[in-house]
Image (tube, grey):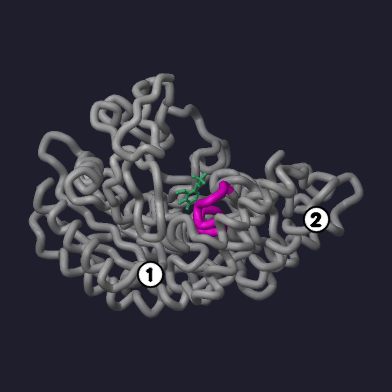
Amino acid sequence: MSLAKKQDQTVAVPNDLEAFWMPFTPNRSFKAKPRLISRSQDMHYYTPEGRAIIDGSAALWCVNAGHNRKPIVEAIQKSAAELDYAPAFQFAHPMSFELASRIADLAPKTMDHVFFTNSGSEAVDTALKVAIAYHHAKGQDSRTRLIGRERGYHGVGFGGISVGGMVANRRFFGAMLPGVDHLSHTYNREHQQFTKGEPEWGAHLADDLEKIVALHDAATIAAVIVEPMSGSTGVLPPPKGYLQRLRQICDKYGILLIFDEVITGFGRLGAAFAAERYGVTPDIMTFAKGVTSGSVPMGGIVVRDEIYNAFMNGPEHMPEIFHGYTYSAHPLACAAGLATLNVYRDEDLFNRAKKLEPYWADAVMSLKDEPGVLDIRQVGLTVGIDLASKPDAFGKRGYEAMGHGFHEEGIMLRGMADTLAMSPPLIVTEAQIDEMVDKTRRVIKAVM
Ligand code: PMP
């Protein structure tokens, strides 16, 4: 690949954009007008030309501590110099135990055991496998069925797309896992339009699980997996009482409840996890993204003591768990994770997000009268803004708005079909919230 230097002498701009097959991107239109990022600091990205882009989305919902925070950078550098890699099978390094207990301390009581993966998708597959194997360990072999939800996003593994409910992520990839059912999604514009926080309407939708039990029998069902707040499908906050009701039904039938907290973990909703915000303790929780503030890939699951103990005291023929990844608990990720949790603690960032929520909610709701805005959903430091589709091209508005935001306004937004989403780093100031909302207002006016 040949490289051309632009104004910023530290950064090389590639001439060849063809070799890299970009994920989740219309490659041809991106490459015709690329959005390149070469540097980041705190609330900003910088293009190779040195243009500042305010990060309105914590990149992919992950940079919760802000970019290139010094303690995190230094911890990664130190680990890279001292311990480049160590296996987590049959050997281990001290930071992996330390990080696991720090995460367990943030998780709800009785969730004290952590299994590490490298991504949210791996965390989801791990959670599903652990759920099925747990029932086997308890002598309930018939419990293998998995229940997801329409409009759910659980990453891109075959397990994740099977329990997930986004058609675009499923339709070209074959038959999916067998034995999967879906609850209805929880969004209803008529009853929920322009709601701040959790909508009043919709708790009864959890009763779908009762219908699935009636159809298949609880003795065939291993687990239900939901995002406490669905992010990638356009920010769908849970209706008031919905998660509690799901918990009750799971308890009634011995079904495990899995919260996919890949987005909601580490402060996004003004608490360590959504489980804390909603006062509902799942049996298994996934995490990724915010655990290292996006700096080094890492994910994992946190499980209830009862689940861990079932494996520790499992039947003789069953190994504790035959599952794991070469890079589980990678030293660089553990170093980054420990430093990130220190930043969250020292700067009280989860509480900061909680205190900022009313300001954020008012600011983003002020966009409701802009042309073409059909709905705005806000919860924690997130928002989803539905825009009217183009008459001839459903699902293109978000992508257009993302491009316009980057090139014309200097803001990173997330576009998902006709929805625009924002979820800033938790260090955002009120002035920066105003700036983001002003920029987004101009983006909406321009694309509508
Ligand atoms: N689960 C949820 C709820 C997510 O939002 C995501 C990513 N957006 C994933 C799983 C997958 O994570 P990853 O991209 O790290 O595999």
Give the percent coordinates (x, y) of residue 193: 22, 65
Q: Between residues 66 and 127, which one lies in front from this camera angle?
A: 66
| For the residues bearing labels 1 and 2, Cβ distance under 8 angstroms | no
Asked whether residue 131 is in view, the answer is: no
Look at the image and give the residue range highlighted in magenta.
Answer: 288-297
Instruction: Give the residue at mark 2.
Output: 311
Looking at the image, which residue is at 17% across and 35% down?
393
Residue type at tag 2: Phe
Disc sitting over residue 96 in the figure: none
Q: Relative to 445, is 30 above or below?
A: above
Measure the C-alpha gap from mark 1 to mark 2: 36 Å
N-terminal-most mark, 1 or 2: 2
Q: In the drawing, does residue 312 fall left or right of residue 359?
A: right
Screen quadrant of the N terminus = top left
Q: Relative to 372, is 3 above or below?
A: above
Asked whether residue 39 is in view, the answer is: yes
Q: Relative to 65, is 5 above or below?
A: above
Residue type at tag 1: Gly
Give the percent coordinates (x, y) of residue 354: 41, 77
Disc sitting over residue 380 in the figure: 1
Q: Secondary structure at mark 1?
A: loop
Q: Is residue 352 magenta?
A: no
Query: How would you rate the neighbour count of disc 2 (Cα within 10 Å): few for under 14, some for 14-19, many for 20 or more?
Result: many
Give the percent coordinates (x, y) of residue 409: 19, 51
Q: In the drawing, does residue 309 fall left or right of residue 17?
A: right
Q: Quadrant of residue 189?
A: bottom left
Looking at the image, which residue is at 42% across and 45% down?
165
In the image, is the residue at mark 2 within 8 Å of ligand 1 by its beta carbon?
A: no
Give the main secondary structure of the magenta stretch.
loop
Q: Quadrant of residue 23?
A: top left
Query: How would you rate the neighbour count of disc 1 (Cα within 10 Å): few for under 14, some for 14-19, many for 20 or more?
Result: many
Looking at the image, which residue is at 41% across and 39% down?
10
